[in-house]
Image (tube, helix red, strand yellow):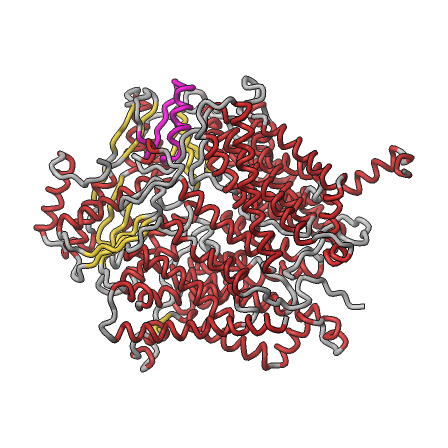
Amino acid sequence: MRKYTIGLVSVVLLLSLLLSACGGAADDDTFKIGLVTDVGRVNDRSFNQSAWEGVEAAAEALDMPTDIRYIETMDATDYEDNIRQFIQEGYDVIVTVGFALGDVTIRMAQENPDIKFIGVDQFQGEVVPNVAGLIFYEDRAGYLAGVLAANLTESGTIAGVFGTDLVPPVVAFKEGYEAGARAVNPNINIISTYHPGDIGQAFTDPEWGAATAAQAIDQGADVIFGAGGVTGNGALEETATREGLYCIGVDSDQWHTVPGARPCLVSSAMKLITPAVSDLIQMAAAGTFPGGNYFGDAGLAPFHDFAPQIPQALQDELVSIREGLESGAISTGYGQ
Amino acid sequence: MYTWQKVTKFLSRGSVIFTFLLFLLAVIVDQTDMGTVPLRVFVGVSALNFTLRAAVPLMLGAMSGILCERSGIINIGIEGMMLAGAFGAFAVKVQTNAMPLGLSLFLSTLTALLLGGLMAYIHALLSIRYKVDQIIGGTVIIMLAAGLSSYFFNPNWMSVGKFGTIEIPLLSSIPVLGRVLFSNGLITYIALLLVIFLHVMLFHSRWGLRTRAVGEHPRAADTVGINVNRVRYVNTVLGGMVAGLAGAFLVLEAVGQFKEGMTAGRGFIALAAMIFGNWTPVGAFGASILFGYTQALQNELLLAGIVDIPRHFISMLPYVVTIVVVAGIVGRTRPPAAIGKVYESE
Amino acid sequence: MEESTTTEESLFKTAWQTLQIPLLAVLTAFLTGAVVMLLSGDNPLVAYWGLLQGALGDLGALSRTLRRATPFIFTGLSVAFAFKAGLFNIGASGQFMIGTICSVAVGINFEGLPGIIHLPLALLAGILGGALWGAIAGWLKVWRGAHEVITTIMLNYVASLFAAWTVFAGGTGGQRPGPLSDPVAAARAISETRHVYDSARIPRILPGILDRVHWGIIIALLVALLIWWLLQKTTWGFEIRTAGKNPHAADYAGMRVGRTIVLSMAVAGGLAGLAGAVETLGLNYKFAPEFTGGAGFEGITIAMLGQLHPLGVVISSFLMGALDAGAAKMQFDSGVSREIIQVVQALVLAFVAAPSIIRSLYRLPEKGKGRVRRLGWG
């Protein structure tokens, strides 16, 4: 019997060999775009995914044959190897996602001046012509979320459930959120916390996010800002199971990415990675690639079903605050 | 030796007493003006709710461990069985989104039990039939569950609906207690009842006697006609199903979605709870509450923002407490005598 | 002295008998992995071809494999050494983290120290840190009977939180930054250390030819030799092996079992700590929380696959290193998710730990007792 099993397996393996077409090598005139994720999967419903969707959007928009691939990073020591993989295969644009890849990206870019690098969340201290550091004013998006939250709360207590303070964008969201809420009501009670675990768990522990949101609700919070990958999504979905509460999502318009949160999701503090990555890739294809820092759009997502509940005065105020933030008339106080 | 057992017994009762004291204090704080901020941090309703919620997967995991280990099979693979259960529950929940919620939840929970049981069956096969060291067997289960669930997980899957809160009439209107104990989801109630049921069964039933006999003196059990390895198979698979239920709790009652690695070490803390509870269900329950409470407290302290020490040290609390209770206070706990040893009838 | 008369033929036979289980276990794991891939519609041959290409296809791939194998040799030795003493060291990843922190603390300080002093000092710090972390678990076992599996699991969590704190940028609320955090990075809320000074870096081997392969691999091979000598040729090694096989007999024979346990855990911890130090001083040059002690967990599989023998550990490390090194190329070429590698690794561990599965699968004669000893809670 076992002999047959082994025989069967070998036959199946051989068949699959015959059936498998040789992976056709891409022509030299195809525009090749590669993406290296931060530690995590490409479809993480968070920034890795947003960046990948940007690559896909660019491939769609470009009027030339393209080849797009990604490599998922399993261990931080692999960043350089994964980037080199794309360099070796002759890729034209390499997108690296996350601040942690900043150093490596710059080093690789200096070694390979003909390849364009897009570093998501990577602040550029000095301009390297073939690196665009895609960065966002997360603190401004957080500030707007804070203003919104402080206006919506009836209990006077608002909460934030955050990923980890080991990652700069999360810190920026939190600081902005608290500054915005205090700007509306200096005496507002803000209860917020970061995930207690290490960086490997901080964004992938939805039950902690949910339980912490419940804890904050028990303490009287009626607006919950969930910012931290799947952990934050857990907080949103938990809030959605209670009556009469609001929640605010993060990164993308979570009305689309977390449908389970719709009963409470009034808006999201967005950093629009997808269109910015797509734009930068198209600029690279057109030969107008900008080195240095490139600021992506950050702001509030549409209110969707909650639009009727938001007074027009508040909606107008949010628009003018956003203008104030952009002109520098209003400061979030973060990073100064 | 005898005094140590006494101390251990006292302590595992102690954690149960601790649970009751916690509730008592909470009622007082909630009902009087004593509820100033520091006191609420320690015994507020929010802390107790978090405690129970964090404790449910721990107590289910610990029950899983007790079922296996009382019959002589070491189970450090609880984490893997939990994860397999969580993944199974989620996969089926997604496929049955269109069905009525009750049926869909029932099928998903069933799958969680089956997958948890399947992982445990592999563990039992490795341990009993193939005589693999049981700690290594458990490591295999953890790695296998993590690898397979990530490989097959499709992040575009989205489940709709989860176990809602069931308010128990009358009881749920008791101050504090009602809000904490009698206003929960179905799996939480099952977990609480399972603790009592298992405790009674283990110490006051024929099955319990056989299980303990197999775990303590397999040779003697064999001579009186008990099929040692069959008891071990059955108990291990049952244990796996209970761990699978913990996974179902995470996906179907607590979160509603799945994420790779979402058990986040809960299986390991459950293991510690089992040892702290000296392999008794009620003791392990007390330990789970204690560990859940350290997590709640850590969160409360951070939310209240009243402590000035770096949060990393607060975050170490549950792990340090575990080391202290497993090593320092409890001293020599006594595992079942025949644990980890292969039994071959002559 | 009778062994010296063995003919070459039977030497070959002995070698085959030692190697057949690990080899067949690896083969079976790959076949099972292929079945899993077929079940989910992936093509295993394309995947495995990509894996091979990525592991050994060219000099860059070979360098990658060598680099990945380096920490594995240390952590594999760590687990194997503890196992010889009857201890299960699940805590290699925590000891790795502490070793990393300690070596980096020396590496970013003492500017101007000559390399001949600075580098050994940094390596020594890593060893001592890991050894201390390992010894805690050993000491708790001797003093309180706390099982090392539980304590080392918990110490892993504590180590990773502690390591994260040392480089913590301060985040919000004006908390004090961790002692090792780099103020320049901290200003941008990035938690990491400065780069270690050049004098504390492990030099590279053949920089133009092999990509970033450093002398750490040679250190690893020498340490493997040292561990073999320690276990087989010294009295202390004999005490360790006796305590591992039968602690009661060792006790009866007047050996200090308690001391042996603590020291064995210290050596195991030191090896894992050295893994962290070598990885940091040879490759990363800095520490940030995203560098984890993952190599510690793979040490378990490597030790078992290597049948607890230092030479076996070295060979297994190269195999596991190759698996990890080829995974990126595999995903690149075939689109197969690299999680499948984790499944294959789990299967390798399962099959190598259960020789009777392999024997019955390939109709090999059953041998008396398995090589793997049983541990247990007691």
Locate the C terminus of chain C and report the quarter of the image it occupies: bottom right
Is B194 on the left or on the right of A147, as rendered? Answer: right
The spot of residue A199 in percent (x, y) is 41, 45
Say if the magenta span includes residue B218: no
- Of residues A88 and C118, the one drawn nearer to the viewer in this rendering: C118
Image point (76%, 54%), residue name: C254
Q: Can you see residue B53?
A: yes
Question: What percent of the width, then of the height, locates residue C233?
Answer: 76, 39
Quadrant in the picture for residue B168 = bottom left
Relative to residue B263, is residue A244 drawn left or right? left
Q: Is residue C343 left or right of residue C224?
A: left
Look at the picture and state if C15 lies above or below B175. above
Q: Which residues are magenta?
A: A99-123
| Closest to the observer, C140 or A101 | C140
Where's residue A23, x and y in %? 53, 31
Which quarter of the rendering shows the N terminus of chain C?
Answer: top right
Camera-side residue of A113 and C98: C98
Relative vertical location of residue A149 with respect to residue B236 in this rendering, above or below: above
Q: Is residue A111 magenta?
A: yes
Residue A252 visible in rendering: no
Judged left or right of residue A277, residue B270 is right
Residue at coordinates 52% horizontally, 23% vertically from top-left?
C115
Q: Is residue A248 above or below residue C222?
A: below
